[in-house]
Image (cartoon, rainbow, N blue to C red):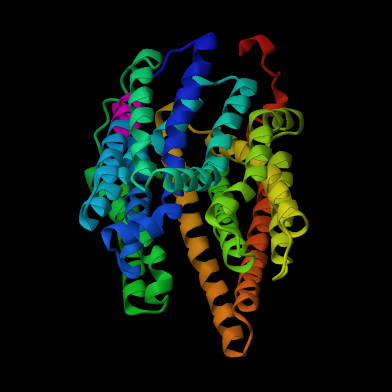
């Protein structure tokens, strides 16, 4: 085993790992609020500004599988420290950047570090907590970080940009990253990877990383370039060809990057499909509801951040306490199904929100339901995905799960935003006001995202069959904390 920590010492280690993951999750959204300031300061055009976001997404999505496998081979703690170091140094460079090229390049390096941290952190937690009750509680903490971190990023980004400058959304990572690194040296013992001795599948690593990067690039630029354009179709075709080459390599190489039998694990496969659908719904909720409040209801950036606060608090309460109890009481499938069903209802409420909506009546109810749904659903989804994976493949499986979330979120958001834009343009040409056309477009996208969440709820509640339901095990002793 890479880690040997017993008793109470595991819980400080969990908090440390979650802080590292929170830093990564925050950075996926904190920059969005500061984009207007970055544009004005560094002279970005509307077209070039998107690369402040896309450069991060491109390398993050492309390196998740590789980062997870490297952790299995060379040690999860070693790779976690390397990822934190890379992310922190890149954050410093972003904060000091005075040119467009330097900022975009540093954001790309941030994405590599973030991918390594995200892929390895989940496998570390699964290896630290092996007893079902404690694992459920630990995954609840991790689930809160993943589910609520993006919303917190919007609020924090607004505060830092308004009070200081856009540079501080990156510079704030420096003391946090240094503290996490030093604490890791004290709390996480080192050791060889659980797949130590196997060779790195270089050909497989190159083809799958290139395939994922091309796919992410095509997706994030799909709306701007056109989904039927030569660029989009060519990039997606190249990504598919590289994926086929990767699968061929993995079926013949002696030590594959991704052992193909791993992808045939029922729990992991179904959980990934659920993760893709759910990530598409959640990304759409976060992005489109923020646009609805800003462009239709007239909220400013700070008000949008505060509007997400109730859902964040609900997520915290459910993830940190309720989710683990519900999983132990009712099992993974029922908890996941009901959580995603609540999220689907919350999205449907947003689809019914009118042009002159009021926060308490038309925004808050959906926020609360989505907070509860997200708060209790992510924990069982991660438990189901990782539960049957061998320890030596835990980092890789974590990379697979994170990749499913990343690709599902990026693709879902791109498609749903495209649907909203098309509906808005149609109504504008028919003579509707700007606010009415925008709201109708958002409503259509929310209905589709609610349908995605509903399908995910059905798969999670009725198709997923965990081999070892946590409810069958005795809950952990309260003194174990």
Q: Which residue: 53% across, 48% down?
A: 272
Give the answer, above or below, for where 393 lies relative to 287.
above
Region of the chain picked out in magenta, as a range: 71-83
Which residue is situated farthest in the bottom direction here?
Answer: 430
Image position, residue 399 (x, y; %): 42, 41
Could you tell me residue 448's position as x and y percent?
A: 64, 66
Residue nearer the viewer, 351 or 126: 351
Task: State yes or no: residue 223 in magenta.
Answer: no
Q: Residue at x 70, y 43 (%)?
A: 372
> Is the stretch drawn in magenta largely helix, strand or loop?
helix
Where residue 428 sits in the image (x, y, percent)?
58, 85
Count up the numbered dots. Answer: 0
Front residue of 347/67: it is: 347
Q: Where, by quadrant of the figure, is residue 353 drawn?
A: bottom right
Residue at position x 46%, y 42% in the image: 26
In the figure, 211 relative to 127: above or below? below
From the viewer's perspective, tell me whether residue 474 is left or right of residue 18.
right
Can residue 477 be seen from the camera position used here? no
Which quadrant does the C terminus fall into?
top right
Q: Is-magenta flag for residue 74?
A: yes
Q: Is residue 79 visible?
A: yes
**Quadrant of res 396:** top left
Residue 470 in the image: x percent, y percent?
Answer: 67, 28
> Is 160 left or right of 97, judged from the image as shown?
right
Viewport quadrant of the N terminus = top left
């Amino acid at each position: 085993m890479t880690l040997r920590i017993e008793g109470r010492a595991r819980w400080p280690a969990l908090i440390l790992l979650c802080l590292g993951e929170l830093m990564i999750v925050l950075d996926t959204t904190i920059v969005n609020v500061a984009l207007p300031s970055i544009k004005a300061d560094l002279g970005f055009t509307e077209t070039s500004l998107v690369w402040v976001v896309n450069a991060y997404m491109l390398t993050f999505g492309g390196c998740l599988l590789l980062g997870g496998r490297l952790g299995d081979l060379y040690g999860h703690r070693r790779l976690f420290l390397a990822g934190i170091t890379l992310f922190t140094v890149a954050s410093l460079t972003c904060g000091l950047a005075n040119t467009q090229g330097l900022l975009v390049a540093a954001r790309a390096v941030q994405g590599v570090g973030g991918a390594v941290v995200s892929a390895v952190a989940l496998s570390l937690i699964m290896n630290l907590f092996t007893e079902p009750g404690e694992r459920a509680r630990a995954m609840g903490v991790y689930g809160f970080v993943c589910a609520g971190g993006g919303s917190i990023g919007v609020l924090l980004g607004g505060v830092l940009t308004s009070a200081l400058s856009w540079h501080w959304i990156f510079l704030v990572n420096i003391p946090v990253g240094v503290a996490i690194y030093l604490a890791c040296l004290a709390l996480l013992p080192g050791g060889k990877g659980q797949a130590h001795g196997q060779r790195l599948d270089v050909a497989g690593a190159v083809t799958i990383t290139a395939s994922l990067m091309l796919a992410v690039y095509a997706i994030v630029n799909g709306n701007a370039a056109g989904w039927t354009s030569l660029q989009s179709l060519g990039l997606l075709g190249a990504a598919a060809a590289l994926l086929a080459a990767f699968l061929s390599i993995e079926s013949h190489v002696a030590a594959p990057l991704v052992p193909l039998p791993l992808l045939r694990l029922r729990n992991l496969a179904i959980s990934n499909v659920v993760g893709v659908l759910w990530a598409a719904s959640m990304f759409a909720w976060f992005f489109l509801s923020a646009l609805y409040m800003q462009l239709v209801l007239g909220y400013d950036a700070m008000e949008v951040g505060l509007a997400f606060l109730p859902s964040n608090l609900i997520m915290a309460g459910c993830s940190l306490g309720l989710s683990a109890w519900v999983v132990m009481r009712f099992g993974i499938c029922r908890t996941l199904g009901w959580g995603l069903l609540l999220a689907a209802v919350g999205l449907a409420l947003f689809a019914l929100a009118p042009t002159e909506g009021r926060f308490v009546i038309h925004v808050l109810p959906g926020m609360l339901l989505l907070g509860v749904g997200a708060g209790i659903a992510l924990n069982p989804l991660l438990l189901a995905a990782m539960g049957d994976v061998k320890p030596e493949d835990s980092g890789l499986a974590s990379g697979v799960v994170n990749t499913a979330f990343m690709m599902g979120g990026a693709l879902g958001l791109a498609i749903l935003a495209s649907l909203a834009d098309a509906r808005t343009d149609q109504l504008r040409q028919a003579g509707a006001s700007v606010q009415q056309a925008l709201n109708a477009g958002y409503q259509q996208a929310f209905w589709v995202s609610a349908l995605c969440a509903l399908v995910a709820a059905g798969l999670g509640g009725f198709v997923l069959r965990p081999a070892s339901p946590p409810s069958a095990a005795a809950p952990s002793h309260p003194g174990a904390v």
